Image (cartoon, helix red, strand yellow):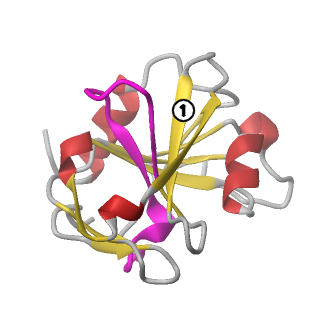
Amino acid sequence: MSSANGKTGGCQCGNIRYQLTGEAVMLYACHCLDCQKQSSSAFGMSLIMPRDNIEFVRGAADLKTWDTKGGDGRIKRCTFCPECGTRIYHGSDRENENISIKAGSLDDTRWLRPVAHIWLKSAQPWVEIDRENCACFDREPEDRAELARLWRQQSGGS
């Protein structure tokens, strides 16, 4: 697995460009209905990082946000390009919390290997998951610290 540091990404139209400036905390695939709708696909990929580990190279002032409530009742702030609508990241209304980079917005996604699949209760029946090599959860994991530990282990950290 390679490092997230230095990876670049952006929106479909090129208005928004960013670079990751630190290491990711974890990566998982979420099969909840919100992620399916947001990604217009079978699941969403969330690369969890400290908020300060994304540097916008172009378009930061143009970013728009839309707030919704997550399953836990907390605010989920969705950040996207106003021109093409590409989601860039999700966060909360709390500035000190990690954000979820929408991993499909990265220029190179070949290095991504999720350590878990969550909300499998909502997964499309045709999606095949390697349950031997990935943690699987029918709903939201009770403790995401385990996902972070698995990510560090997978990426060669301690």
Residue 23: image location, x then y, percent = 18, 51
* Residue lying at 72% horizontally and 59% vertically, measured from the top left: 128
Name the residue type under label 1.
Answer: Lys
* Residue lying at 29% horizontally and 33% vertically, measured from the top left: 149
119 is higher (above) or lower (below) than 2? above
Which residue, given by chain and number where applicable, does mark 1 sit on?
A: 76
Indicate whether residue 92 is drawn in magenta: yes
151 is higher (above) or lower (below) than 105? above
8 is higher (above) or lower (below) than 149? below
* Residue lying at 67% horizontally and 48% vertically, measured from the top left: 35
Residue 34: image location, x then y, percent = 72, 42
Helix, strand or loop under label 1: strand
For the magenta stretch, what is the residue range? 89-110
Which residue is at the front of the view, 158 or 42? 42
Relative horizontal placement of residue 90, taking residue 126 as reference (left or right): left
Q: Which image quadrant for residue 103?
A: bottom left
In the image as oriented, which residue stretches furthest toward the bottom? 13
